[in-house]
Image (cartoon, rainbow, N blue to C red):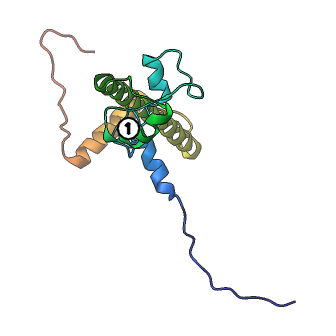
């Protein structure tokens, strides 16, 4: 059997993986109403047109940014809906931005919680102590660390007048 040797090539990804991660934390679009597509997101349209059906109804065009102009060539076919005003699009944009802020906050808190749980389980697994420290051990450690840092001062015991000591 003949063995072929090929020149090794580097892969050329169509979509780099790091851009996917960045979209979770920072979107690449400027207009949150249409996400720079020109068409208002169906979930936002339903706030203005409650019975809106994406598969049946005309496509509402965003008036907030210039991306809506990309769809004006379809006006003669009766495919686009321009009834949603600039002011309404501004409000929808503000709603979508707030939703995005809450989503990222929730995601951050979830990841932070997972990280803390993972760190805690690793610490418990590799901890040499079989029990938690008692109060006296904790005070001793605080004193020793304070002395090493140079910010610990021993307070001499003083007799309080009128108090009997045994």
Res 158 seen here: yes
Q: Position of residue 81 (x, y in %)?
A: 44, 27
Residue lying at the far front of the rendered structure: 76
Judged from this view, the residue extending furthest toward the bottom is: 2
Q: Quadrant of residue 9?
A: bottom right
- State the residue at coordinates (31%, 33%): 64
Rendered location of residue 139, percent (x, y): 34, 33
- The quarter in which the C terminus is drawn is top left
- Furthest-right residue in view? 1
Q: What element does badge 1 sit on?
A: helix
Residue 133's place in the image compared with 11, above or below, is above
3 shown above or below 97: below
Residue 163, image quadrant: top left
The residue tagged 1 is 68
Q: Quadrant of the N terminus?
A: bottom right
**Residue name at image x 12 percent, y 12 percent:** 161
């Amino acid at each position: 059997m003949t063995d072929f040797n090929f020149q090794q090539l580097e892969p050329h990804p169509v979509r780099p993986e790091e851009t996917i991660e960045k979209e979770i934390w920072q979107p690449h679009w400027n207009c949150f109403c249409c996400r720079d597509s020109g068409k208002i997101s169906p979930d936002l349209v339903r706030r203005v047109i409650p019975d809106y059906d994406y598969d049946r109804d005309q496509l509402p065009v965003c008036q907030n940014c210039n991306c809506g102009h990309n769809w004006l060539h379809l006006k003669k076919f009766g495919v686009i809906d321009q009834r949603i005003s600039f002011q309404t699009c501004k409000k929808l944009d503000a709603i979508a931005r707030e939703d995005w802020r809450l989503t990222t906050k929730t995601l951050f808190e979830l990841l932070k919680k997972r990280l803390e749980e993972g760190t805690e389980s690793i610490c418990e697994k590799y901890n040499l102590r079989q029990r938690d420290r008692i109060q006296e051990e904790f005070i001793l450690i605080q004193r020793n660390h304070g002395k090493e840092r140079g910010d610990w001062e021993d307070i001499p015991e003083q007799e309080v007048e009128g108090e009997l000591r045994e």
